[in-house]
Amino acid sequence: MNAATLTLRDVSVYRASEDGVRRPVISGLSLRIPAGQRCMLVGPNGAGKTSLLLALVGALPFSGEISLGETALCAKSLQAIRRRVGFVFANPDEQLFCETVSDEIAFGPRQLDLPQAEVEQRVQHALNDVALPHHAHKNPHQLSLGEQRRVAVAAALAMHPEVILFDEPTANLDPVARHTILRVLAHAQATVIMASHDLQAALALGATVALLNDGRLLACGDGRTLLADDRLLIEAGLALPDH
């Protein structure tokens, strides 16, 4: 896998509201995430974190410029960029659809018309990466939430992406599953972007933190510095003001 730099210039992301009118959920955001960096999007519910991730793979309309390396995301480049970017949903049920774990992980590489031997090698390596080497022939829908999320991560890793997007990767996991996911996030040979409420994970990974609230980027920088700034956390809706 080769990591890639992701650049956003004056990006606004749009969703249709209940009245059918398209309104921005992210407004005028500019951000550069260097190749190989871990970046966590942090903010309260409704801040626009998931919407931003979806826009990065062209799943929501946006204005401004999103570039992966030297390639700008547009209709013409969309399929090529989606081959270079992995996406792991918060809910594994939105991602898992095959009858066995191995088929789930092999599905993406098979679409690349790789030799069968390489597909099998990628599957085994991905299973080892997420500590599920003996689950290849199990039904993913009969696994625990933590195991299902690890299968979804393995499916993304098997594509050898340059960027991997994670939506709430550690939410509702037991300590062992959380530790495994954090280890994968730390060692993935890709640019890693996470939307999460797990502030301790940002600190454990030494991640850059982008603080979002109400569709705006409030600050971006070293996680330990930003998450120690009470004023910023209050502005981001992540801490209560003293009374």
Image (spheres, rainbow, N blue to C red):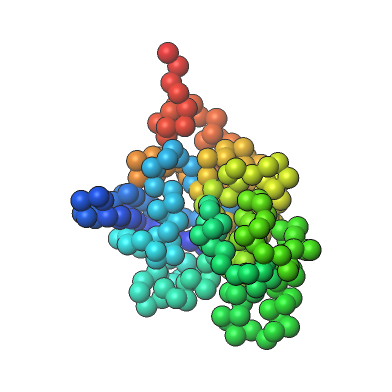
Quadrant assignment, res 47: top left
The residue depicted at 36 percent of the width and 71 percent of the height is 74
Q: Please indicate whether residue 135 sits to the left or right of residue 54 in the image.
A: right
The residue depicted at 70 percent of the width and 73 percent of the height is 122
Closest to the observer: 28 or 177?
177
Quadrant assignment, res 222: top right
The residue depicted at 56 percent of the width and 57 percent of the height is 92
Closest to the observer: 9 or 1?
1
The residue depicted at 47 percent of the width and 67 percent of the height is 68
Q: Name the quarter where the N terminus is drawn.
A: bottom right
- Count the marks: 0
Q: Position of residue 166 (x, y in %)?
A: 54, 55
Q: Please indicate whether residue 80 sits to the left or right of residue 203 in the image.
A: left
Q: Name the quarter where the C terminus is drawn.
A: top left
Q: Is residue 174 visible?
A: yes
Q: Is residue 64 visible?
A: no
Q: Position of residue 225 (x, y in %)?
A: 55, 35
Q: Position of residue 152 (x, y in %)?
A: 61, 61
Quick one: which residue is furthest to the top in this view?
243
Please, is residue 178 above or below residue 119 in the view? Answer: above
Q: Position of residue 95 (x, y in %)?
A: 53, 62
Please, is residue 128 above or below residue 25 in the view? Answer: below
Please, is residue 201 above or below residue 166 in the view? Answer: above
